[in-house]
Amino acid sequence: MIFSFRPFLTLKRFLPQSLFGRTLIILMMPLILLQVVLGYIFFERHTETILRTLSQNIAGEMALVMTWHESPNTSIDQLKVLAKEYLNLDLAFDENKTLDQTGQYRENWLYDPLITALEEKLKSAHYVRMTPETIHISVQTKKGVMTASLLRKRLFSRTTPLVLIWTTVSAMLLFAVASIFMRNQIRPIRRLAEAAERFGKGDELVPFKAEGAVEVRKAGYAFLRMRERVTRLLHERIEMLAGVSHDLRTPITRLKLSVVMLPDSSQKQQIEADVTMLHHMVEGFLSFARGTTEEATQTVILLPWIQKIFEHHHVVAVNIQGDSELKIKIKKTFLNRCLTNLVVNSEKYAKNLLIDVKRLGATAVITFDDDGPGIPANEREHVFKPFYRLDQARNLDKVGVGLGLSVARDVVLSHGGQIDLMNSPMGGLRVQIRLPLDA
């Protein structure tokens, strides 16, 4: 087996998935790169150059003091006054003493340039020690040890931290402003996605206005035109189906009256059966057309609402249980028809029906279990097709036209949910409906 390392795929797992998050990364990367470059330039170049220059200035002052000290015309008291007045150095002398050690107090980036400069300017042994406020430079002279004290800030430039602080603050302000503007630019895209999602669930009344950048507005206008065309096409087909079905009622009624006048015979029974079938087909078409009309969503407590639907249902023994506080937004008429279809289908073949309502994450799960003959696994997808009639084992629309489960699935899909058929632990069929709680 050959293992291939793909760093970009590995990195992609940790990147944000949203456009807003990825845009922020695009904004952050140049700012971080800028901070790194500035840090390198100031710490490695600018600070080093300034520190070297300041160290050379201090070393030059110490060399000048040593020259004054070696002059026979300058006394120690005069040297102290001159060093304090012109060089801002405090001098102290320990006569007849030698340096115990030379070099520097510790290894440090601030010591090294000063030691290098002193070695270039001074020929005598010297020792450097620093405190948080003061630098002490001890030099071996012929008469003893001379110690010069000066402020530590003379060796340190405040330019670097100030530059880094201001650039960091500026970068943070720029990032904050860019985030606000980017959020405003992404908001129209999010609204477009929400409108498309709700339209896909059958909500044609969702308000949407094209806004944002030119490209986003173009996408918004395209969505509005598409929604208008799809809505018009659906309404035209539904109206045509409803009109044709309604017009068929009159000739079917005439046929039924004519059949009644016929003498009793096997042929009359066959004709009555055919007319009855036509009647059920027309009623099914009209019911299907009515079920595809628009309806607004409402918030209900799911379990009591279902119990109220079937409280007077006595054809099959219905037992309803589950979460009694589960709330969900639904189209009440649509879902009522969906659940009623499922119960009516169960009562044709089963004696007992169990309805269970529960929450599973962000999903409401409604489960129907019965003790009927069930449906073969290879037929479970076909029974959702419109006008499909199952003749083996269990015909879910024995007196209908094959629209029961088709309408039920349309209703569930319009809520953004999913409906599945499987084997029931009661020995029959299990119908499981999953509805998003944020539908």
Image (cartoon, rainbow, N blue to C red):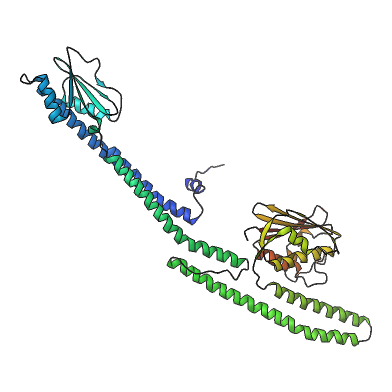
Answer yes or no: is residue 247 visible: yes
From what the image shows, is residue 147 above or below residue 430?
A: above
Residue 255 placed where, x, y %? 83, 85
Position of 204 with respect to 261 (left or right) is left
Q: Quadrant of the C terminus?
A: bottom right
From what the image shows, is residue 160 above or below residue 284?
A: above
Position of 210 with respect to 256 (left or right) is left
Q: Residue at x 51, y 44 (%)?
A: 4
User: Can you tell which quarter of the image residue 326 is in?
Assistant: bottom right
Position of 214 with respect to 159 (left or right) is right
- Please, which residue is most extreme toward the top here? 96
- Please, which residue is most extreme toward the right here? 264
Residue 223 placed where, x, y %? 53, 70
Answer yes or no: is residue 432 visible: no
Q: Quadrant of the N terminus?
A: top right
Comparing 294 with 220, the one in front is: 294
Q: Residue at x 59, y 68 (%)?
A: 199
Comparing 376 with 372, the one in front is: 372
Position of 122 with respect to 299 (left or right) is left
Comparing 303 with 185, the one in front is: 303
Residue 224 placed where, x, y %? 53, 72
From what the image shows, is residue 311 above or below residue 46?
A: below
Give the mark count. Answer: 0
Residue 11 placed where, x, y %? 48, 46
